[in-house]
């Protein structure tokens, strides 16, 4: 389009220069034609010979008409050239308009995204999370806690809790005291029951100003980073993008859990142990009445050639191909009960569909006992059939003896 415009401008300049040259040539021809001079002798002759003078006047009038015709001819030529140039310009303008119509219009400019608040980059949100466990935790759950500590740089840890229910205030009082000493606002407490077979995770707010709410989860399907041997990797201490399922905005008790997960797993901006990078995603999904937790790495692959870059930009609007690769750990949280306070208080929510793992094992053992009973009954039925089946004696059985 720019080359076509330049050509149009150059043609216009050439035509204007030709028109100026024609006008200058006409002016020079008119100046060169000199009128006849009238002296004193001619005046006397005109007085004596009026007929001759009349003839001279007619000649002068004829010459003036010729001059007018000569002036009119170049002006007509100039007008014709101007008309031709106007026609050419109109044709070129039409061609340019057609080319402009063929080219796709540029996309409308998108308004800039305004931040909800202006951050000065300082460490204002001083959230701290206490991550501890009880005595009797197996190796699998201990490695799970270590993985969670690497994902939460604003954590505080302590030795294994050895408090009993018989102690004053129970386990909850001991955890709240440790959180107050450490200056923590939230807590994650993992306890095991039945010799490490059952794992329960407590999560809640422990600050004295707003002690609670707290949630008790049953942890299942635990897989640590080392166990999975996944290829994903991220920078230690990087801030995550927390992704929640749409159900966390619809179900009432999930809205509360969403705020709790944001405060526990969300790394505060400017924390001394955090890195100013976002290279991973922590996803929370609600399915089968349980919360499925996954941790992914954000990978941006650079295209190898221009064709791949063009295809990727046409599909996603960016040259870089963005994908997710799982890092780990992965586990499933089944909410059991939500309390108003920290480790106790008024019950806000109860999961009626939750079946304790002890009841599940008891049902399995009961089914196993029924299998034993069925096997013994089958053996007795076989003996009974054997006794009832009597083979009649063959009268010719003693012939060949």
Image (cartoon, rainbow, N blue to C red):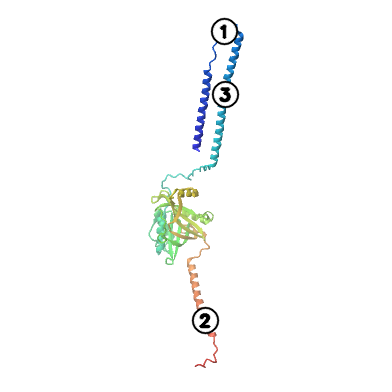
Point out residue 33 in the picture as x, y percentages from the top left corner. 53, 17
Pointers 3 and 1 in contact (C-beta within 8 Å): no
Per the model, the C-alpha gap separating discs 3 and 1 is 35 Å
Comes first in the chain, label 3 or label 1: 1
**Label 2: element kind:** helix
The answer to which image quadrant residue 198 occupies is bottom left
Q: Which residue is mark 1?
A: 43
Comes first in the chain, label 2 or label 1: 1
**Label 1: element kind:** helix
Viewer-side residue, 297 vs 321: 321
Point out residue 162 in the picture as x, y percentages from the top left corner. 39, 62
Crowding at dot 3, Cα within 10 Å, few <14 / some 14-19 / many 20+, comes out as few
What label does residue 382 carry, if any? Answer: 2
Point out residue 13 in the picture as x, y percentages from the top left corner. 50, 30
Per the model, the C-alpha gap separating discs 2 and 1 is 168 Å
Viewer-side residue, 366 vs 398: 398
**Label 3: element kind:** helix
Comes first in the chain, label 3 or label 2: 3
Q: Which residue is mark 3?
A: 73
> Does any portion of residue 52 appear in the rendered image?
yes
């Amino acid at each position: 389009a720019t080359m076509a415009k330049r050509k149009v401008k150059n043609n216009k300049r050439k035509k204007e220069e030709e028109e100026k040259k024609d006008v200058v040539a006409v002016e020079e021809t008119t100046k060169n034609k000199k009128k006849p001079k009238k002296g004193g002798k001619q005046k006397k002759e005109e007085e004596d010979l009026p007929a001759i003078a009349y003839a001279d006047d007619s000649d002068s009038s004829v010459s003036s008409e010729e001059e007018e015709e000569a002036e009119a001819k170049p002006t007509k030529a100039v007008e014709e050239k101007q008309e031709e140039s106007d026609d050419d310009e109109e044709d070129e303008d039409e061609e340019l308009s057609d080319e402009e119509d063929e080219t796709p219009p540029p996309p409308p400019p998108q308004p800039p995204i305004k931040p909800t608040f202006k951050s000065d980059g300082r460490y204002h949100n001083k959230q701290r999370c206490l991550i501890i466990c009880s005595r009797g935790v197996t190796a699998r759950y201990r490695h799970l806690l270590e993985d969670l500590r690497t994902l939460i740089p604003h954590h505080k840890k302590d030795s294994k809790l050895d408090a009993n229910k018989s102690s004053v205030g129970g386990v909850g009082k001991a955890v709240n005291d440790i959180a107050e000493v450490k200056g923590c606002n939230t807590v994650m407490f993992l306890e095991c029951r039945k010799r490490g077979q059952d794992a329960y995770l407590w999560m809640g707010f422990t600050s004295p100003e707003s002690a609670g709410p707290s949630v008790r989860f049953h942890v299942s399907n635990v897989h640590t980073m080392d166990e999975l041997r996944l290829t994903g990797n991220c920078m230690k201490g990087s801030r995550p993008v927390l992704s929640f399922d749409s159900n966390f905005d619809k179900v009432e008790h999930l809205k509360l859990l969403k705020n709790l997960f944001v405060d526990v797993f969300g790394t505060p901006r400017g924390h001394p142990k955090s890195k100013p990078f976002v290279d991973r995603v922590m996803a929370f999904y609600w399915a089968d009445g349980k919360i499925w937790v996954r941790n992914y790495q954000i990978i941006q692959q650079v295209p190898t050639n221009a064709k791949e870059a063009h295809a990727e930009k046409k599909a996603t609007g960016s040259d870089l191909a963005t994908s997710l690769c799982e890092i780990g750990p992965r586990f499933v949280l089944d909410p059991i009960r939500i309390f108003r306070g920290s480790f106790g208080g008024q019950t806000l929510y109860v999961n009626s569909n939750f079946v304790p793992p002890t009841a599940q094992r008891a049902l399995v053992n009961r089914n196993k006992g029924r299998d034993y009973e069925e096997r013994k009954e089958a053996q007795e039925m076989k003996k009974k059939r054997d006794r009832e089946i009597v083979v009649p004696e063959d009268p010719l059985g003693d012939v060949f003896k």
